[in-house]
């Protein structure tokens, strides 16, 4: 059964939310659905091949200050900009009259944008009786500290949403590890498996087989990791390091990293052949974001995780700890210092490749199947 599906996502710090939403859109379009993806974060410059892509007036944040939304120029997002986003989403709902609306992260997050999500849901319900409203979330969430906000989320799930697609594997990391799962939420959870890209072929061994590959995703949050790794590289002059710097890092910081790098450390901008380099490296050092971890599981290489934990963020620490318990990675924190990082690097290299991951990485097929079941239940 083919359906019209409208997905909306706003990434604020890195690009992980958008990457995941694009993967979901591709999978659903490949299954024969008519998919529109509306993105409210900063443009990533990538084309949409098999689905329609709509760019809303973008907003972003500075670091982990998620309360204050900014525009492209770093100025406070005006009420007019926020209203224009909302109006564009409502117009899409009226134009498409979708069978399914998917809100990425909301209502578990993006509380500062609740108005536009709620307006979209209301417009979609008015445009089509029986529209399915789904939330799409990653494996780990950051729960608010205030009980009333948890209750608000549970109430919205109970009254507005038909299901919650959890793009994870409950055998590895169940949602209740990071969020209080009430009965109202539990009855609507549908685990799809992780939304992973197909595995890449290894790169040229001569270039990367002995290399310690260091990556940090697409945000500026990885800058402390890069600085710490260069400090560790100075302590390990016999080890070749290759740092791939994401475009979230400023030109000035990139230049400073290059200038401070020791002779055994190569610093360059992130490359499109990253998956192939990862598949052939001797060790990966990275944070523990959703998409980064999936790349690691696909590659099956030794991994050292340095989770991002600024601003009371717990998502990456929880995910990294789960992988360490499963024997799939080692974990070290920046607070332990360069010497501890250097020791962890040597220990990870001695330990070698992890065992084959027993993790459900077929989240694309899982999401397609889940939505097919939900559509059939409405037929």
Image (spheres, rainbow, N blue to C red):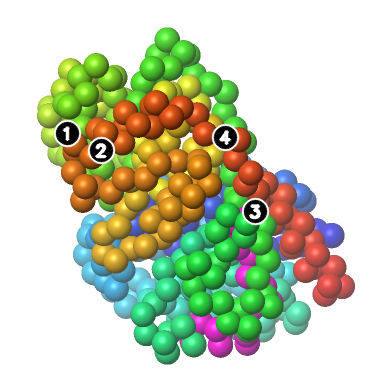
Residue located at (38% from left, 56% from top): 317
Q: Is residue 236 visible?
A: yes
| Circle 4 residue | 355
Find residue 45 and report its horizontal and vertical position in percent. Answer: 43, 43
Q: CA distance from mark 3 to mark 1?
A: 37 Å
> Do we see residue 6 in this rendering?
no
| Left or right of 57, for residue 344 | left
Which tag is nearer the camera, tag 4 or tag 1?
4
Q: Quadrant of residue 66?
A: bottom left
**Mark 4 touches mark 1? (CB < 8 Å):** no
Q: Which mark is residue 90?
A: none
Helix, strand or loop at label 4? It is loop
Residue 95 is drawn in which quadrant?
A: bottom right
Labels 2 & 3 near each other (Cβ < 8 A): no
Identify the residue at image location x=67%, y=84%.
Answer: 126
> Under tag 3, what secondary structure?
loop
User: In this image, 97 relative to 70: left or right?
Assistant: right
Residue at horizontal 37 percent and vertical 85 percent from the top? 146
The answer to which of marks 2 and 3 sits earlier in the sequence is 3
Q: Are marks 1 and 2 in contact (CB under 8 Å)?
A: yes
Residue 254 percent coordinates (x, y): 20, 35
Q: Is residue 293 left or right of residue 194?
A: left
Question: Label 1 belongs to which residue?
Answer: 231
The residue closer to the viewer here, 159 or 358, is: 358
- Residue behind mark 2: 341
Q: Which residue is mark 3?
A: 193
In three-dimensional space, the C-alpha distance between marks 2 and 4, rounded to whole angstroms, equals 23 Å
| Residue count near mark 3 (Cα–Cα under 10 Å), binned few <14, some 14–19, many ≥20 | many
Magenta region, residue range: 152-169
Real-space Cα distance between discs 4 and 3?
A: 19 Å
């Amino acid at each position: 059964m083919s359906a019209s599906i409208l997905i909306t996502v706003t990434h604020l710090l890195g690009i992980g939310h958008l990457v995941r939403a694009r993967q979901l859109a591709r999978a659903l379009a490949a299954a024969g659905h008519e998919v529109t993806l509306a993105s409210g974060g900063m443009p990533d410059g990538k084309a949409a091949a098999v689905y329609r892509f709509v760019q809303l007036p973008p907003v972003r944040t500075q670091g982990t200050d998620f309360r204050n939304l900014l525009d492209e120029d770093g100025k406070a997002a005006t009420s007019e900009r926020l209203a224009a986003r909302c109006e564009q989403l409502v117009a899409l709902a009226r134009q498409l009259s979708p069978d399914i609306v998917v809100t990425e992260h909301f209502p578990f997050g993006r509380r500062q944008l609740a108005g536009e999500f709620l307006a979209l849901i209301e417009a979609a319900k008015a445009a089509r009786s029986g529209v399915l409203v789904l939330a799409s979330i990653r494996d780990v969430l950051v729960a608010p500290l205030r009980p009333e906000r948890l209750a608000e989320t549970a109430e919205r799930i109970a009254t507005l949403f038909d299901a919650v697609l959890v793009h994870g594997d409950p055998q590895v990391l169940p949602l209740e590890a990071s969020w209080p799962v009430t009965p109202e939420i539990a009855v609507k959870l549908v685990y799809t498996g992780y939304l992973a890209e197909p595995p890449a072929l290894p790169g040229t061994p001569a270039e990367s087989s002995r290399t310690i590959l260091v990556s940090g995703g697409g945000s500026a949050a990885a800058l402390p990791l890069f600085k710490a790794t260069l400090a560790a590289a100075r302590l390990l002059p016999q080890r070749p390091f290759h740092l791939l710097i994401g475009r979230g890092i400023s030109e000035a910081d990139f230049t400073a990293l290059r200038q401070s790098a020791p002779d055994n450390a190569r610093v360059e901008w992130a490359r499109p052949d990253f998956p192939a380099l990862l598949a052939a490296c001797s060790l990966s050092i990275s944070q523990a974001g959703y998409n980064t971890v999936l790349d690691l599981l696909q590659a099956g290489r030794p991994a050292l995780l340095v989770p991002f934990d600024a601003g009371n963020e717990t998502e990456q620490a929880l995910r990294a700890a789960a992988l360490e318990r499963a024997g799939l990675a080692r974990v070290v924190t920046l607070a332990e210092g360069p010497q501890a990082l250097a020791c962890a690097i040597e220990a990870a290299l001695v330990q070698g490749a992890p065992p084959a991951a027993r993790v459900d990485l077929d989240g694309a097929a899982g999401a397609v199947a889940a939505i097919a079941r939900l559509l059939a239940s409405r037929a």
